[in-house]
Image (cartoon, helix red, strand yellow):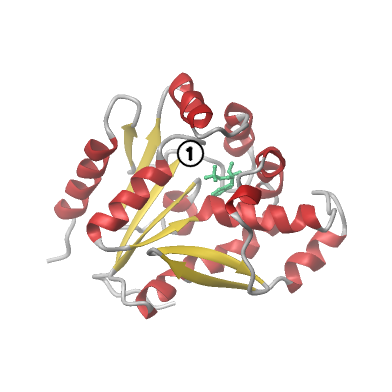
Amino acid sequence: MTTTPDFLVIAIDGGAASGKSTTARKLAEELDLMHVDTGSYYRSLTAAILEKGINPDDSRLESFLDSASLSTRIGNRSGTLLLEGVSFPQEVLRSEKVNANVSSFAALPMVRKKLFDYQRNQVLVAQENGFSGLVMEGRDIGSVIFPDARVRVFLHADPAVRSSRRAAQGENDAIEARDKTDSTRATAPLTCPDGATSIDTGSSTVEEVVELISQLVQSRQTP
Ligand code: C5P
């Protein structure tokens, strides 16, 4: 992977319904960057694994991951993970079944390993598609995937605010249970990495959060 010093990476981490996607999409639009939602990558792998009837402790998981071929399609400046050239529809990725299982698969080192290089390679994909940078959102972007990102932020909000966001989206999602699994796993746990800027999205509008992150980007421009 080749990164030039002027290629901008913005890492956005946070728990479920912390406002990552809304913020990341708007930021990418305003700064003309590629947007990558790594949660959707874990959701896609989970949907494919569930479709094959494989459990987290199933011996077939390793061979499935070894043989799965991953590629990217860009639409509306967002990258979509393709498995064997095919993507899952949003209603599958955001289904109750995927919501209930994604954190168990995401806790497995072999699943994270499968996505590690792929996520880092999105820099190349962005460059090949003419973007000068990317906004990547997830749980371990600022801690593990791009610890040297120019800007790293950690979004959080009161649990009641987050639950009401999910309810408004009409999704059945046990967000506190997912956060617990995500933040207590041994590999790449959900955490606010040292040096990241922590932002409460419950007490600010999306515009204010985007403005704050844009200011961080400006203050860290390369000369
Ligand atoms: O962001 P979203 O809620 O769609 O993520 C779904 C799940 O994917 C998370 O609960 C977490 O288990 C996993 N995930 C992760 N690391 C990332 C992004 C998502 O473990 N970088």
Count residues near mark 1 (Cα–Cα under 10 Å), then give few for <14, some for 14-19, many for 20+: some
Whether residue 195 sits left or right of residue 219 in the image: it is right
Query: What's the residue type where badge 1 is placed?
Result: Thr
Extreme residue toward the right, this view: 59
Q: Nearer the viewer, residue 192 or 49?
A: 49
Q: Secondary structure at mark 1?
A: loop
Rendered position, 133 above or below 11? below
Whether residue 150 sits left or right of residue 119 in the image: it is left
Image coordinates of residue 126 in percent, x first then y, are 38, 72
Image coordinates of residue 11 in percent, x first then y, are 38, 52
Rendered position, 124 above or below 59? below
Whether residue 135 sits left or right of residue 168 in the image: it is left
Image coordinates of residue 49 in percent, x first then y, are 76, 56
Image coordinates of residue 217 in percent, x first then y, are 21, 53
Q: Looking at the rendering, in which quadrant would you find the N terminus? A: bottom left
Residue at 68% in and 44% down: 98
Q: Which residue is mark 1?
A: 191
Tell whether circle 1 marks a residue whose Cβ is less than 8 angstroms from ligand 1. no
Extreme residue toward the left, this view: 223
Extreme residue toward the top, this view: 160
Rendered position, 184 above or below 163? below
Whether residue 133 sits left or right of residue 171 in the image: it is left
Residue at 51% in and 55% down: 38
Residue at 79% in and 63% down: 62
